[in-house]
Amino acid sequence: MSTMNISLPESLKAFVDDQVSQRGYGTSSEYVRELIRKDQDRLELRQLMLAGAASAPAAAADAAYFEGLRDRVRQRSKK
């Protein structure tokens, strides 16, 4: 694992220390790693949403569509 040092103003360091103690993290590094992973997930979701918005429209997701999904699930669960 690589090491990265960061500088924080005292108020942010105090915030991180509080989060570590209140939320059960072992170290501030664990807290920062989780924040980075969540940001990665957020960026990935954003890219998926943008790709979906740029794609061609699909069939409407109306009541019949969802009933068809339920029927397929019911059929698979019978197997």
Image (tube, grey):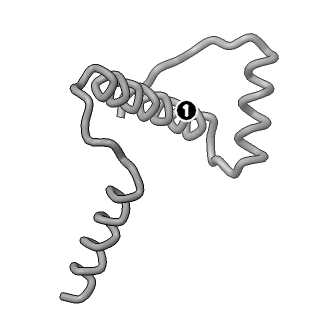
Q: Please state, as top left, top right, bottom left or bottom right, where the C terminus lies in the image.
A: bottom left
In the picture, residue 14 is in which quadrant? top right
Q: Position of residue 37 (x, y in %)?
A: 45, 35
The answer to which of 67 and 6 lies nearer the viewer is 67
Residue at the image position 29 percent from the left and 65 percent from the top: 68
**Residue 60 shown left or right of residue 30 in the figure:** left
The answer to which of 36 and 10 lies nearer the viewer is 36
Q: Please state, as top left, top right, bottom left or bottom right, where the N terminus lies in the image.
A: top left
Q: Position of residue 34 (x, y in %)?
A: 53, 38
Q: Residue furthest bottom?
A: 78
**Residue 53 shown left or right of residue 3 in the figure:** left
Residue at the image position 23 percent from the left and 25 percent from the top: 55
Q: Position of residue 41 (x, y in %)?
A: 42, 35
Above or below — where is 21 with respect to 43?
A: below
Q: Secondary structure at mark 1?
A: helix
Where does label 1 land, which residue? 35
Above or below — where is 75 with respect to 68?
A: below
Count the marks.
1
- For label 1, count other residues whose C-alpha is less than 10 Å away and answer few (under 14), some (14-19) or many (20+): few
Residue at the image position 50 percent from the left and 35 percent from the top: 38
Q: Position of residue 67 (x, y in %)?
A: 36, 65
The answer to which of 10 and 51 lies nearer the viewer is 51
